[in-house]
Image (cartoon, rainbow, N blue to C red):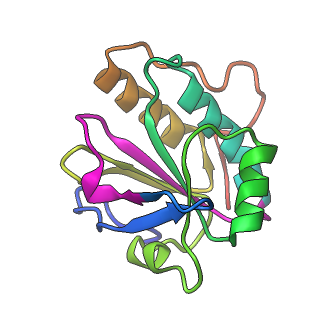
Amino acid sequence: MDHLPEGTLAPDFELSTADGSPFRLSEHAGDRPVLLAFYKSACPTCQLTFPFIERLFGGFGPEARPAIWGISQDEAGPTRDFAERFGLGFPVLIDAHPYPVSVDYEVRYVPTVYLIDPGRRIRMADFGFSKPALRSAADAFARSLDRTAPDLFAGDGLPERRPG
């Protein structure tokens, strides 16, 4: 297994953004799922994936943003640079060496994404560039927001999957 299995209670954690703003999973308020997206800035597959995660974030309009948290395995500088390079509007948290949250989530490859339901259960987990995983997240957010899921991949010509 390359990630925690679906149905597992997601481990609680607290991480901060590069500017020190804390985020704690158990304090995530609301009735919506949260998508955790683990990455390393130098990873080419992460660089391919994160623009689509940003499309997912922006795809419901400014009044209905889904809960997406990037989780960087880099220092603050590269984390900020990555977020700026890809225009990320969602929070990007730092899981500093020795990567305690990545270890708790059994992240072996990046990118790895987890969709966590409001009861903190893992509803989807996948790694690498995965159109099925991102479509699943879009559908879950659409249901929780009572919206139509955005088409993240229209005419992109990319394969369904690419290993991380």
Residue at 27%, 45% in the rendered image? 117
118 to 41, vertically: above or below: above
Residue at 52%, 38% in the rendered image? 134
Side of 153 relative to 9 (left or right): right
Residue 119: image location, x then y, percent: 18, 48
Q: Quadrant of the C terminus?
A: bottom right
Residue 129: image location, x then y, percent: 64, 49
Which residue is outermost to the bottom? 98
Q: Which residues are magenta?
A: 23-43
Residue at 35%, 68% in the rendered image? 13
Residue 20: image location, x then y, percent: 54, 62
Residue 151 visible in the displayed image: yes
14 to 126, vertically: above or below: below
| Residue in front for this viewpoint, 95 or 16 | 16
Residue 45 visible in the displayed image: no
Q: Is residue 64 magenta?
A: no
Q: Quadrant of the N terminus?
A: bottom left
31 to 39, vertically: above or below: above
